[in-house]
Image (spheres, helix red, strand yellow):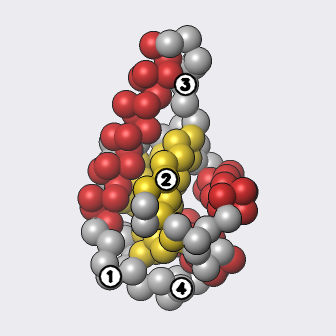
Amino acid sequence: MVMNSPGSEGSGGSSGVLAQLRASNPDITGAALVTADGFAVEADTGPEIDEESLAALAADLLARASRSSEEFGNGRLDELYARGDEGYLIVVRAGADQVLACLASSNATVGLLLRDVRHAAAQLA
């Protein structure tokens, strides 16, 4: 089940981790736990974010980047960080078959953002 309303989830399970992630870092505008094949398991996003697109694109990006990393001898990629004019996209493996995708505003402190997302991914793994 995919949750649309930020902060409405309880404290248990993946939805609780996503809500806690967004609550702990106000620069995070959306978070989704995604299967390796691109389906959203849970999401905590605003209404302006299409969760299905975020899920599909995040899984595809990590898979393609991981193939490139392996091709050049760097092994399997565990996380992907992208910065655009309006914000950040962070995709981190959360176990063997899932990834955590997070969107953040351009005002985010990158070190804190990465710390918070990595911690959440570890909790979800």
Q: Are marks 2 and 1 in contact (CB under 8 Å)?
A: no
At horizontal 48% and vertical 41% (from top left) the residue drawn is 97
Please state the horizontal and vertical placement of residue 10, each as a whole percent of the image: 58, 83
Q: Earlier in the sequence, mark 1 or mark 4?
A: 4
Q: Amino acid at mark 1?
A: Pro
Q: Depth-wise, is mark 1 or mark 4 nearer the camera?
A: 1
At horizontal 42% and vertical 75% (from top left) the residue drawn is 45
Residue 84 visible in the current orientation: yes
Front-most of residues 77 and 43: 77
Q: Amino acid at mark 2?
A: Arg
Q: Which mark is residue 47?
A: 1
Q: Which mark is residue 7?
A: 4
At horizontal 53% and vertical 46% (from top left) the residue drawn is 81
- Secondary structure under tag 2 reads strand
Residue that numbered label 3 is attached to:
76
Q: Which mark is residue 83?
A: 2
Q: Are marks 3 and 4 in contact (CB under 8 Å)?
A: no
- Between the C-alphas of marks 3 and 2, the distance is 21 Å
- Left/right of residue 46 with respect to residue 7 in the rendered view: left
How packed is label 1: few (under 14 Cα within 10 Å), some, or many (20 or more)? few
Q: Earlier in the sequence, mark 3 or mark 4?
A: 4
- Between the C-alphas of marks 2 and 1, the distance is 22 Å
- Figure quadrant of residue 13: bottom right
